[in-house]
Image: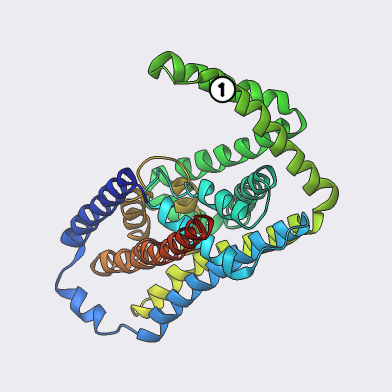
Amino acid sequence: MKRSQWKWLLVSISFSVLVMAGVLYFTVDEMTVEYLSRVSPLYLALAVLFHIVSLVFWALRIQLMSGSLGYRVRFMHCLNLVLANMLVAAVTPSQAGGEPVRVHELYRANVPVGDATAVVVMERILDGIVLGVLGAISMLFLGRYWSNLTSGFSGLSFIMYAAWISVMLFVLVFVYSVKNPDLLKRALKWISRWIDRRWHLKRLESLLDTIDREVDNFNAGLVKFVNHGKSGLVWGFIFTLLFWLSEFAIASLLLVGLGQSPYVIESFVVQLVIAIIMMIPLTPGGSGVAELGATSLYSLFVPSSIVGVFVLLWRLILYYLNILLGLLSSLVIVRREFLARAKKQR
């Protein structure tokens, strides 16, 4: 990682720790010790296992989507790039910041940049589609539970609807831009010129030429998906669904591990809200936003004495464990690059 990335990682962790300390300060009381005496290590271990399984689903998604375009990428390579991606996502705004890492690592596995970009962007589109569908289902078919939740927090309904509409609009705009790549080019060039007027980009014309070239490469990759990689889209959708369902189950396992009811339906709705909000670029890795959001929403049905400990365990698995695994996978990548460079110099 570059020095600037280490700085943002420190900022992200510090922000998360400060918010978490505040949450624990206001939620821990004498009843917390009693709740902690009921902790079940088995369910806590299952929660960690479910997160590992989620990452395996993600790696399989990348492997099968790449395979549908005619590229054989080893599963362990896919798993390692997913883990490295999690580290970068922890230092960039929102949790959707590891795309360049995934593109680079697919390129290192002999997948052309255009096709690698198509795979990675299609992953994000599938995330949007799955979260959008799950959001629609929760709003349409979980009316009673939805009413119970929103009665305790009037802003929850607005947040959910706004986030869901934003995701669906993004997906629709993307689909339209795929059919009309010139629209995507114009939009990216307009953004580049807008940035140039304020910060005076170096080599703007070179950047505009790169946009033309990469949009064409990206569009060609998507055409491959539609014409030859339909199986990759099907498998991608299946593993995307499995990934999110597995991630959403972690909170219920932690609640059971802390001696609470799993609150499966309520937790599903809350996790869906948090997942969509976490895609909005607010803070590095969503730190602070996740802790405050989870504390506010889970306090609607989880005793206040335990909600802080629950959120701490939840973030230890979904954030701090990601950083640790990401650091380990980054060492693998650094070692590989060092050996490759040494081999070239011989």
Name the foreground residue: 151 vs 85: 85
Neighbour tally class for label 1: few under 14, some 14-19, many 20 plus, Cα within 10 Å: few
- Residue 217 in percent (x, y) is at 71, 37
Q: Is residue 238 above or below residue 193?
A: below
| Disc 1, SS | helix
Q: Residue at x 41, y 56 (%)?
A: 87
Left or right? Give the position of 148 relative to 71.
Answer: left
Q: Residue at x 17, y 58 (%)?
A: 26
Q: Quadrant of residue 24?
A: bottom left
The furthest residue to the top:
197
- For mark 1, what is the residue? 206
314 lies above or below 35: above
Q: Identify the residue shown where x is 37% and y is 55%.
A: 297
Model colouring: rainbow
Left or right of residue 244, residue 176 in this image: right
Residue with the most extreme front position: 346
